[in-house]
Amino acid sequence: MLNNFLGRYNVTRSMSRPGTPYDNAPMERWWNEFKLRWMARHPLAKTCEELVRLVEEGIEYFNHHNRSAQRNGLTPDEYWSEAA
């Protein structure tokens, strides 16, 4: 049933390859940080529009404003620009 639904909308499941459980580790880490550092610190959205706005603001923050010692004090955007 789920596969039919996904296929109808051309959605590809994200699953690790056999024997490689860390395939999704970067995204899982980002999602965990996003929930703990962004979603939990903001009021619960009451409408779909509020939720979309909250998520978009969080993505903007984490990509363009969140500086990290792991990236030498750079935002992800600055870090990737420097690497290119």
Image: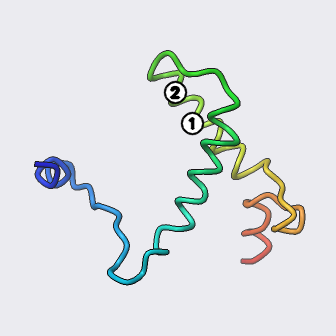
Q: Look at 27% across and 61% down and name the residue there.
A: 12
Q: Is residue 69 above or below residue 35?
A: below
Q: Is residue 73 left or right of residue 63?
A: right
Count of numbered labels shown in the rendering? 2
- Disc 1 from disc 2: Cα separation: 6 Å
The image quarter containing residue 10 is bottom left
Location of the C terminus (image quadrant): bottom right
Q: Residue 1: give its label.
A: none
The image quarter containing residue 11 is bottom left
Residue 65: image x %, image y %?
Answer: 79, 47
- Of 22 and 55, the residue lying toward us: 22
- Of 58 and 83, the residue lying toward us: 58
- Of 81 and 48, the residue lying toward us: 48
Q: How is the image coloured?
A: rainbow
Q: Look at 82% across and 67% down and name the residue there.
A: 71
Residue 18: image x %, image y %?
Answer: 32, 81
For this orientation, the residue located farthest to the bottom is 19
Q: Look at 63% across and 46% down and name the residue there.
A: 34
Residue tagged 2: 51
The image quarter containing residue 42 is top right
Q: Is residue 70 above or below residue 42?
A: below
Residue tagged 1: 55
Amino acid type of the residue tagged 2 in the rendering: Leu
Q: Is residue 35 above or below residue 48?
A: below
Circle 1 — which element?
Answer: helix
Amino acid type of the residue tagged 1 in the rendering: Val
Q: Is residue 58 above or below residue 27?
A: above
Residue 20: image x %, image y %?
Answer: 42, 81
Q: Residues within 10 Å of mark 1 (few under 14, many from 20)?
A: some
Q: Is residue 31 left or right of residue 37?
A: left
Tell me if label 1 and label 2 are in contact, CB under 8 Å: yes
Q: Is residue 24 left or right of residue 10?
A: right
